[in-house]
Image (spheres, helix red, strand yellow):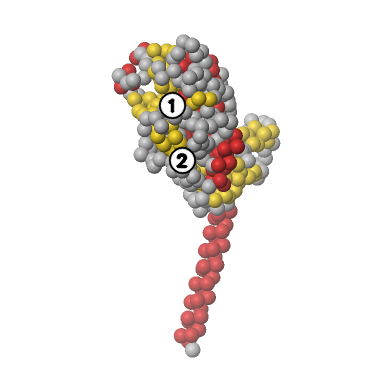
Amino acid sequence: MKKLMLVTIILVVIAGSLLYFNEFRSTSNIIQDSLPYEELTLVKFEVPSEVYLAINENYTIPVNIEEKDGKEVKVKFISDDKKIVNVINDNLVGKGVGNTTVKVKVSNNEEKEVKVIVTDLISEPIINNDKPFLECKEYSESEAKLLDVLLDYKIKEKGYMTRSGALEAARFLLLRFKQNINYFSENGRLENHSNILHVDAEGRYYHKGLYLSEDKYKDISDSTETGPVMWGCPLKNVMYRKYYDNGLNCSGFITWALFNAGYDIKDVGAGDYNYVNNELLDLRPKEKITMDLLKSGSVKAGDLIGFDGHIAMIIGIDKDIIYVGESYETGTRVREFTSDTLLESDFTDIILMDEYYKSDGNYSEMW
């Protein structure tokens, strides 16, 4: 009987300890998720309504706060579901596919909510020229629509009709999209087609979004006998009379990036012909690539780079490395150059784009 009473007492003590521990842990969470209260008069407290993240992507929510008396305002970020989004050192980290809410709380107990969508359709920006090539109809209609939303969101976050918006469009396809796009030597184009066919979206895609679904066919104005077909699907090349997977040629990639960022440059090529006066190499005067130019500080990410018949974009500058994004014979890719190796490369000219873009937007030399 005494043993039974002793066991009962022990169990009661353990249960009480567990209850206390859980209560303490709960209280600790409340303390962790709160801030010391202070009297504040906020004139402005703005956060984005929604954020899109890739798995493992780090993101800092932009918080626009203005306090009437200029007092410092402390901010706390609280995730409703840490399996989807975690908060580490005030940065959001995408952890799992899904939607959740992040509360942005300030030290007078005011708070706002941000909807966070984490997806595995894109990756955090990374150079990977060995990505698999896009296959025909690889994405469903719903996935294709979400990818268009993601592209539009990322561009507008950096600044629509800015240098950074154009950069983000190029970086999205090169660094975030999970497949490489095939190179397709164009069957024709919509502007300056000269002796070749007046054709839409064959080796080019002068439309908003990604060319990944049959829903996009309704926007295609002219096509050859085997089109229209989306990127990754077989299309007969008129010149070579063979089937290749549809994709982008060099100027098709650059005009696509500019158009999606809000710059209607028209569906033009990259030659340097005297009888055609609005090709990509005619956007602004070309600067011959020299060591003086590269060291001048005037070259920025988002500038165009090329040679007669080819065009690409500088998508990043990091100390001594210049990153060039392009669609060439092997498809979409990123090439890395030092100043010395760029001088020795096939690239001959840089087009400084400040006057064309007008605004830098949320510019960053690297991603």
Residue 316 seen in the figure:
no
State the SS at label 2: loop
Amino acid type, mark 1: Cys
Depth check, front residue: 182 or 20 = 182
Work out how far the residue at label 1 is from the one at label 2, CA to CA, in angstroms: 19 Å
The crowd level at tag 2 (other Cα within 10 Å; few <14, some 14-19, many 20+) is: many
Q: Position of residue 203 (x, y in %)?
A: 47, 30
- The quarter holding residue 160 reads top right
> Where 282 falls versus 170 (above or below)?
above
Depth check, front residue: 116 or 111 = 116
Residue highlighted by disc 2: 233
> Where 264 falls versus 220 (above or below)?
above
The crowd level at tag 1 (other Cα within 10 Å; few <14, some 14-19, many 20+) is: many
Depth check, front residue: 84 or 301 = 301
Residue 250: mark: 1
- The quarter holding residue 158 reads top right
Q: Where is residue 356 in the image (x, y as percent from the top left)?
A: 54, 17
N-terminal of the pair, mark 1 or mark 2, is: 2
Amino acid type, mark 2: Cys
Image quarter where the C terminus lies is top left
Depth check, front residue: 334 or 12 = 334
State the SS at label 1: helix
Q: Position of residue 259 (x, y in %)?
A: 55, 27
